[in-house]
Image (tube, rainbow, N blue to C red):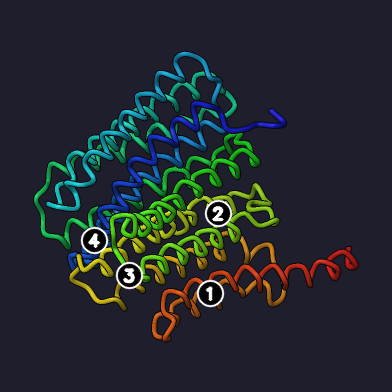
């Protein structure tokens, strides 16, 4: 299809993913305010990988093979059921470290994907080796995860190490499968799908800003809640503006470039969701419901904002921009990390994020006449 767009079923699938993302962000929020930041961040990254990877695999498959018939819809519903199961277990995963429910939901989602890939192998003879490689690779990975879960409880270090091995196995599957014959995914559709998920994760920050205003509605008198709400609005719209710039996100179908862009979005999505958790932390700090300092709360926002900028530079700007414009986001990522040490703190983070939009737009516009003249 020349004008392939997101389908209602894909949007419905995203809605289910929202629940899991919100659960992961809430778990991170509560871990930080309880002064268990390191453990909370690790658990958040583990949970978010499962959410993102299952979403991403379905999205790329659907871009290539979504015929929207009854069987495709039914298998998609099975995968969505796995996502809901996974979301239900994220809270327990944060509280006790029990991975069972998350793993069950994840395996359900991935088994559904095996069925879809086998169906593609049966119908797309030209790319049959690729589809079978996907089905086999996903199947091997799921066996690993089942063994991993049944091996619990293990020491934290061993658990994290074995989880990382499983992640590497999962990441390797598309790398090997696509080298046999690339699946017929639709570039503009993939860009749209990734953008839609980015909007979802940015919604976590809007929700946190609403929590700050809710404190005022409930009778709180601190002006700091207004500062949090305004800063969250400035930051989330700046992040939105940076992501949805005029430059094409993925201007090549080269496999290595595609993998860099597709995999690199994990940083963008995870940090986008973590910004919302950071603002929720700040609300609790100001309300006196947290065991951490205000500086730590400011850094709960600054660090993910900086990573969001770095992620955008990694997947897009270093490929499509020239001159000083190429380095705007890394420079401002550093400035964002320094802002909490200034007297302005949160307002400084918001200012640096907004200024990154201004600086990038100005420098890109300044380079455009030169590019036109060269052309």
- The residue positioned 50% from the left and 24% from the top of the image is 120
Residue under label 4, please give it.
Answer: 40
Image quarter of residue 187: top right
In the image, which is nearer the foreground, mark 4 or mark 1? 1
Crowdedness near tag 3: few (<14), some (14–19) or many (≥20) residues, C-alpha within 10 Å: few
Mark nearer the N terminus (4 vs 2): 4
Q: How many marks?
A: 4
What residue would you read off at disc 2? 261
Give the distance between the C-alpha atoms of the residues marked 4 and 2, in whole angstroms.
27 Å
Q: Residue 78 at what x, y percent from top left?
A: 34, 24
**Distance of label 2 from label 1 (alpha carbons):** 28 Å
Residue 174, image x and y in percent? 47, 43
State the residue position of label 3. 222
Mark 3 → mark 1, Cα distance in angstroms:
21 Å
Q: Nearer the viewer, mark 3 or mark 1?
A: 3
Dot 1 corresponds to which residue? 351
Observer-nearest of 260 and 55: 55
Viewer-side residue, 166 vs 312? 312
Q: Secondary structure at mark 1?
A: helix
Q: Residues within 10 Å of mark 4 (few under 14, many from 20)?
A: many
* Label 1: how many Cα within 10 Å (few below 14, some 14–19, many 20+): some
Mark 3 element type: loop
> Counting residues from the N terminus, which is met first, the one under dot 2 or under dot 1?
2
Residue shown at the point (45%, 20%) measured from the top left:
73
Is residue 183 toward the left or the right of residue 94 in the image?
A: right
């Amino acid at each position: 299809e020349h004008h392939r767009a997101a389908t209602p079923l894909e949007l419905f699938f995203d809605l289910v993913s929202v629940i899991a993302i919100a659960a992961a962000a809430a778990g991170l929020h509560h871990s930080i305010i309880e002064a268990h930041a390191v453990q909370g961040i690790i658990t958040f990254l583990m949970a978010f990988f499962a959410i993102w990877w299952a979403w991403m695999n379905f999205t790329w498959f659907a871009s290539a093979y979504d015929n929207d018939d009854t069987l495709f819809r039914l298998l998609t519903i099975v995968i969505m059921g796995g996502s809901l199961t996974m979301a239900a277990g994220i809270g327990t995963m944060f509280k006790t470290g029990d991975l069972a429910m998350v793993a069950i939901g994840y395996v359900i989602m991935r088994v559904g994907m095996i069925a879809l890939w086998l169906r593609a192998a049966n119908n797309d003879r030209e790319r049959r080796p690729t589809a079978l490689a996907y089905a086999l690779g996903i199947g091997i990975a799921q066996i690993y995860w089942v063994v991993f879960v049944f091996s619990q409880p293990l020491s934290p270090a061993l658990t994290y190490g074995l989880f990382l091995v499983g992640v590497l196995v999962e990441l390797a599957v598309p790398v090997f499968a696509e080298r046999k014959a690339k699946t017929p995914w639709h570039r503009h559709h993939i860009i749209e799908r990734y953008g839609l998920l980015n909007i979802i994760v940015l919604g976590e920050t809007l929700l946190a800003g609403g929590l700050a205003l809710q404190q005022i509605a409930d009778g709180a008198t601190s002006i700091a809640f207004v500062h949090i709400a305004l800063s969250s609005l400035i930051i989330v719209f700046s992040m939105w503006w940076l992501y949805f710039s005029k430059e094409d996100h993925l201007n090549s179908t080269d496999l290595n470039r595609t993998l860099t862009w597709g995999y690199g979005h994990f940083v963008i999505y995870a940090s986008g969701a973590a910004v919302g958790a950071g603002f929720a932390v700040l609300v609790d700090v100001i309300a006196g419901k947290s065991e951490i300092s205000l500086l730590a709360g400011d850094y709960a926002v600054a660090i993910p904002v900086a990573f969001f900028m770095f992620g955008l530079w990694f997947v897009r700007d270093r490929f499509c921009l020239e001159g000083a414009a190429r380095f705007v986001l890394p420079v401002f990522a550093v400035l964002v990390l320094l802002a909490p040490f200034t007297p302005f703190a949160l307002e400084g983070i918001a200012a640096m994020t907004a200024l990154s939009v201004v600086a990038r737009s100005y420098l890109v516009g300044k380079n455009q006449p030169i590019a036109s003249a060269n052309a």
